[in-house]
Image (cartoon, grey):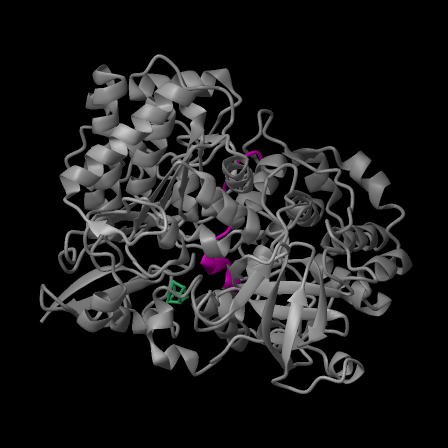
């Protein structure tokens, strides 16, 4: 029996695992007691990882050889890697020549490793000559990125998990961390046990398991977060709880914000949020006087048509009270996916560049071009996730190369996404699993390695870089994602720009990482003092860790100097804007979507285990008992949940976790169990048959957390 240390592949907590194996098969998994994210703990998903990698599950779920579909609608046929790579490169080169670089869209994933991400990003921006690459992180953390950059000057979460134990007030807003980040929740429970004076405020429209354990639950109306934060700031000012010294010394732009929140009185805030005035006052007093105060937040803020404003308005509260840059204080975004952070570090999105550089900055573009040895990096931003699929549905994007993600289930407005996948001339799906809905649309299927087989690094929510190590060989003919991207890049270069083939001469994952490391030199995330060897001997490290350093930095901005040009943090004077699609007489319910405790994303891995259905065994729509009575519905009745875009059929569930006129459907269920239709009657799957594609104008992150729906008995 052998053991290999690695990380869990599910969420952004980034727990360390020890994989037990015999060199061929993974036989067990346990938490790594040495890993500083989890100290040996795992949640129900992490603790069952080995079962999802068994030989029988692998045989049933994995994509084990390259395949090509010779005609749309027909079955895919196994082909050799040579054939698959040659065909992929031939077709991409043909479309590139015929329609230009922007006719190719590459859509990747926050579950890829940093090394995978780096090669994909360079392939698009350094070879194809566009910025037409985006990722499912756009659906996850892009509002957090935009919020940090607008206020603190850099996409850098300032806090660390260690802060949980130092906080006196913990403000959990837009996050059901008991289910979405369970191991972190256990650490928070430990902190409260050790310090019973610690208070938890949870702002969430639903009474989630997290809200159940709060000292104060604020069940605000969907989408009213900015109104709440402005109302809290109004009270902090009124009660003299702002830190005027910190504001004067370390920030700018406060006057405009103070003017804006003047009208956000407790009464007005109560009207906009649906909260009790007394609760708003209590929350403000705890936030401003029972300090240090730590805010933990996630998709409730990010997946919104005003996601950037929500993030920035929350950060405003920390700047106004000086609750940042010290133990137990700060705004702390909890990353959804395991490596959304690493993807941002290498700039693997349509509007970013390597090493947290900005595409809009000519100096940054020149730096990246120099690093890669290319004449230039194009200035025009690429299309972001929703826009890319809309452009494919309109016929402008001709090829979609999708890696490690399942847009035919996870993207909003499935009718458009599926039209895009049907209309594109070439759909390449690079996947570990043969069972995803997107595989059915692929012209070329490229089998990829996954957890327990991959080699590289990831970065978790607290900026901590961990090694991901392979325990067993790849099954069948699966290959590493970076290797597939490298080989396609070299073949494409041979067809389009032979002089650039050497740009992708990477023999190992480490060789890619070393180039990435160099790209961070002098940047806020500088890791030039880090190496694979140091990760081996000293364990996971937080960035920054510049050359000469011996350990990463626990928390940022402790000296009050921020990552802006003048070192001052910026207050964001953002307006409260209503939901993109408010409920009305025809669509009278507010539909919210979110996670279950024991499932992950589209269930391609967790859905293979019977025991993970023990917590929630079937899809349902949660509705308040009053609404059930009003609509004469009983628990288990089949209902049609209808929006302007489509509908799904599913049983109803009685729940007082949602308020009257609100409903909740878990995001995980796919076409096997949750059938749907678009408004033209075509078959769709999952809750995203009804969600809407409206997105935040700054972050371009779609509003997956709210759609107006009608609910009728079938
Ligand atoms: Fe994996 Fe997240 Fe659970 Fe940790 S908390 S074991 S990273 S799913």
Rendered position, 258 above or below 124: below
> With 194 as the anchor, is 376 left or right in this view?
left
Residue at screen point 28% across, 40% down: 530
- Residue 474 pos. (x, y %): 16, 55
Ligand 1 position by quadrant: bottom left
> For the image shown, how many numbered marks are present on the structure?
0
Query: Would residue 156 be counted in the magenta stretch?
Result: yes
Residue at screen point 45% across, 45% down: 422
Residue at screen point 64% across, 51% down: 692
Rendered position, 85 above or below 536: above
> With 518 as the anchor, is 357 left or right in this view?
right
Image quadrant in which you'd find residue 545: top left
Q: Residue furthest bottom?
A: 634
Q: Is residue 542 visible in this depiction of the protein? A: yes
- Residue 297 pos. (x, y %): 58, 57
Q: Which residue lies furthest to the top in this view?
A: 375
Rendered position, 150 above or below 625: above
- In the image shown, does 282 or 636 lie closer to the viewer? 636
Magenta stretch, main secondary structure, is loop
Residue at screen point 57% across, 34% down: 153
Image quadrant in which you'd find residue 6: bottom left
Q: What stretch is highlighted in magenta?
A: 153-164
- Residue 305 pos. (x, y %): 67, 46
Image quadrant holding the C terminus, namely bottom right
> With 528 as the anchor, is 437 left or right in this view?
right
Image quadrant holding the N terminus, namely bottom left
- Residue 41 pos. (x, y %): 35, 71
Query: Would residue 506 be counted in the magenta stretch?
Result: no
């Amino acid at each position: 029996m052998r053991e290999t240390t690695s990380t869990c592949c599910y969420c952004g907590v980034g727990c360390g695992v020890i994989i037990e194996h015999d060199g061929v098969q993974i036989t067990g998994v346990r938490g790594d007691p040495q890993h500083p994210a989890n100290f040996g703990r795992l949640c129900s998903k992490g603790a069952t990882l080995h079962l999802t990698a068994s030989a029988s599950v692998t045989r049933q779920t994995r994509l084990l050889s390259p395949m090509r579909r010779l005609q749309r609608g027909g079955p895919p046929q196994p082909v050799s890697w040579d054939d698959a790579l040659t065909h992929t490169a031939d077709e991409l080169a043909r479309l590139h020549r015929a329609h230009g670089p922007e006719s190719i869209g590459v859509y990747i994933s926050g579950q890829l490793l940093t090394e995978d991400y780096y090669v994909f990003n360079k392939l698009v921006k350094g070879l194809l000559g566009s910025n037409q690459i985006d990722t499912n992180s756009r659906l996850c953390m892009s509002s957090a990125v935009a919020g940090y950059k607008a206020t603190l000057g850099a996409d850098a979460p300032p806090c660390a998990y260690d802060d949980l134990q130092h906080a006196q007030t913990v403000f959990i807003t837009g996050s059901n961390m008991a289910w979405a980040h369970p191991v972190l929740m256990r650490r928070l429970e430990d902190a409260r046990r050790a310090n019973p004076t610690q208070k938890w405020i949870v702002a969430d429209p639903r009474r989630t398991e997290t809200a159940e354990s709060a000292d104060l639950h604020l069940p605000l109306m969907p989408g009213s977060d900015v109104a709440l934060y402005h109302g809290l700031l109004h009270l902090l000012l009124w009660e003299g709880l702002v830190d005027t010294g910190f504001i004067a010394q370390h920030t700018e732009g406060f006057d405009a914000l103070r003017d804006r929140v003047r009208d956000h009185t407790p009464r007005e805030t109560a009207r906009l949020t649906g909260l009790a005035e007394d609760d708003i006052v209590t929350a403000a007093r705890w936030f401003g006087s029972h300090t240090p105060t730590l805010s933990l937040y996630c998709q409730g803020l990010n997946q919104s048509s005003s996601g950037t404003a929500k993030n920035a308005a929350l950060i405003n509260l920390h700047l106004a009270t000086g609750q940042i840059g010290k133990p137990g204080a700060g705004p702390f975004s909890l990353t959804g996916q395991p490596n959304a952070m690493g993807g941002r570090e290498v700039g693997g999105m349509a509007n970013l560049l390597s090493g947290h550089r900005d595409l809009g900055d000519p100096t940054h573009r020149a730096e990246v071009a120099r690093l890669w040895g290319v004449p230039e990096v194009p200035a025009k931003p690429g299309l972001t996730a929703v826009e890319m699929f809309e452009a494919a549905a309109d016929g402008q994007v001709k090829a979609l190369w999708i890696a490690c993600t399942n847009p035919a289930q996870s993207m909003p407005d499935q009718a458009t996404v599926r039209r895009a996948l049907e209309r594109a001339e070439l759909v390449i799906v690079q996947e570990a699993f043969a069972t995803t809905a997107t595989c059915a649309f692929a012209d070329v299927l490229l089998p990829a390695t996954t957890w327990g087989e991959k080699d590289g690094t990831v970065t978790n929510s607290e900026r901590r870089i961990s090694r991901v190590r392979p325990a067993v060989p790849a099954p069948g003919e699966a290959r590493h994602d970076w290797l597939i991207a490298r080989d396609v890049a070299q073949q494409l270069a041979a067809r389009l720009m032979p002089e650039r083939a050497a740009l992708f001469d990477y023999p190992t994952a480490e060789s890619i990482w070393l180039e990435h490391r160099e790209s961070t030199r002098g940047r806020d995330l500088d890791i030039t003092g880090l190496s694979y060897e140091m990760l081996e001997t000293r364990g996971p490290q937080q960035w920054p860790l510049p050359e000469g350093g011996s350990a990463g930095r626990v928390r940022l901005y402790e000296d009050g100097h921020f990552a802006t040009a003048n070192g001052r943090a910026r207050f964001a004077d953002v307006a409260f804007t209503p939901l993109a699609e408010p409920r009305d007489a025809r669509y009278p319910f507010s539909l919210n979507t979110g996670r279950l405790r024991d499932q992950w994303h589209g269930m391609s891995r967790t859905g293979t285990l019977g025991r993970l259905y023990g917590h929630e065994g079937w899809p349902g729509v949660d509705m308040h008992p009053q609404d059930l009575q009003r609509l004469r519905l009983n628990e288990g009745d089949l209902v049609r949940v209808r929006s302007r875009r489509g509908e799904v059929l599913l049983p109803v569930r009685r729940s007082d976790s949602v308020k009257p006129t609100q409903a909740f459907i878990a995001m995980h269920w796919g076409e096997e169990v949750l059938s749907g239709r678009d408004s033209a009657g075509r078959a769709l799957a999952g809750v995203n048959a009804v969600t809407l594609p409206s997105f935040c104008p700054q972050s371009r992150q779609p509003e997956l957390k709210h759609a107006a729906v009608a609910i009728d008995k079938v």
